Amino acid sequence: MLSKEERFNIEVVSNVLPFRVNNYVVEELINWENIPDDPIYQLTFMQKEMLTENQFKLMADALITNGSPEKIKSVANEIRMELNPHPAGQMTLNVPKMDEEPIAGIQHKYKKTVLIFPSSGQTCHSYCTFCFRWAQFVGMTDLKFATEESGRFQDYLRDQKEVSDVLLTGGDPMVMSAAKLAAYIEPLLEPDFDHIKNIRIGTKSVAYWPYKFVTDKDADDTLRLFEKVVNSGKHLSVMGHYNHWKELQTEIAQEAVKRIRSTGAQIRTQSPLVKHVNDDPEVWSRMWRMQIKLGCIPYYFFIERNTGAEKYFSIPLNRALDIFTEAYRSVSGLSRTVRGPSMSAMPGKVAIVGIAEIMGEKVFVLTMLQARNPQWTKTPFFAKFSETATWLNELEPAFGEERFFYQNELDQLVQAKEGQMFFKSDAGTKVLEDAAINIDE
């Protein structure tokens, strides 16, 4: 089915980036008569171009010469560190402290939301080739987030009364058994956590292993857990990662959606825009229409993050806006709950509102849907138009400004987090104290 060269290319790249695929994806989702162009194939199977020529040669040479496991690992780790393994300050800015010690397996970037990385959920049913959390899966312990079922993360949440949302993420929490999942969720239903109103579960299982909710041995137990959360008075949202409408067309995938929704949980859907996978407005509009028909809520249209094989998958921001706009215009209002195009960058979730000409200058109109400092949220700002920029750090402020409006305060927040200085601002110390909390997602 795959040529010897194609299999070798997969071997080379998968020694650097994580590769895993299951029989459901292989047998039900990939059209093997359309290789290598099939979108689900591109979504799950490694391609040579995901590494630079030099990176590919380094790893290929190590394999061809029968390098030792230690040599291959060393080459792989050298290449990985060139791929920006933790973008947007995930390791340096988003990890909170308690009693002056970092809390393993937590990120707290936005004031209202805490991310939890269950230790038993730091793998996936299949790996997405574009995944911005690829560093979780390559065996480099110092790049991995994980926390145990009980202890410090609960103590932290108990004290953070302004936190209303908890997001279990990974990896994929739905690789865990129902019992393991319950060990993380059920304590949050106790009175100590009344301030936690919303529980989210980020998962690709709805697309890559829908059996989890239908025929797996603990499928019913999983759904009863969902019902328990809803009956407790908390909102449960399954954040379904669907990258292409093909992932929604199988009977088992549709049955999984039906069973999840029967518990009272909602399914909100999200995906990045990924070259070779869904860089076509018709793919998005068809996917959103299918999601609405099934009772899901389109939520986010992301820009592919600047990590891993980003050069292979990334799309210029102006083209991303065109794709989003064309798809958005072709669907009814029920699908227009989706937000984007959005970049999950260091200052926050930066959305491209549009392109305009102001005072004779062509600009991107930008805003933040979420921000490290809540006061930045929904503040419009402007960047010079670019036909090539694929990420926020490639944009320049418009109208002769030297820096974007948030940059000075962001720099202060970064320095404060790193313990290099204390600071004040014209906005007052209270604002910055509050904003400093938001460095921890």
Image (cartoon, rainbow, N blue to C red):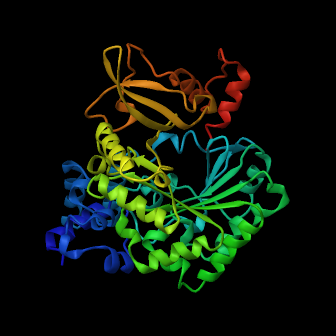
Res 226 seen here: yes
View extreme (right): residue: 191
Residue located 72% across and 46% down the image: 163
* Lateral position of residue 343 relative to residue 385, left or right: right
Query: Image quarter for residue 194?
Result: bottom right
Instruction: Judge by depth and name the residue closer to the eye, 326 or 319.
Output: 326
Residue located 74% across and 24% down the image: 430
* Lateral position of residue 189 relative to residue 365, left or right: right
Tell me residue 429's x, y (percent): 72, 21
Q: How many marks?
A: 0
Q: Is 224 drawn above or below residue 173 in the view shown?
A: below
Q: Is 138 drawn above or below residue 307 in the view shown?
A: below
Res 19 seen here: no
Residue located 29% across and 44% down the image: 315
Q: Quadrant of the C terminus?
A: top right
Q: Is 329 drawn above or below residue 278 in the view shown?
A: above
Tell me residue 231's x, y (percent): 76, 68
View extreme (front): residue: 332
* Lateral position of residue 328 relative to residue 182, left or right: left
Q: Quadrant of the N terminus?
A: bottom left
Query: Image quarter for residue 148?
Result: bottom right
Residue located 47% across and 25% down the image: 381
Tell me residue 142's x, y (percent): 51, 52
Tell me residue 371's x, y (percent): 57, 35
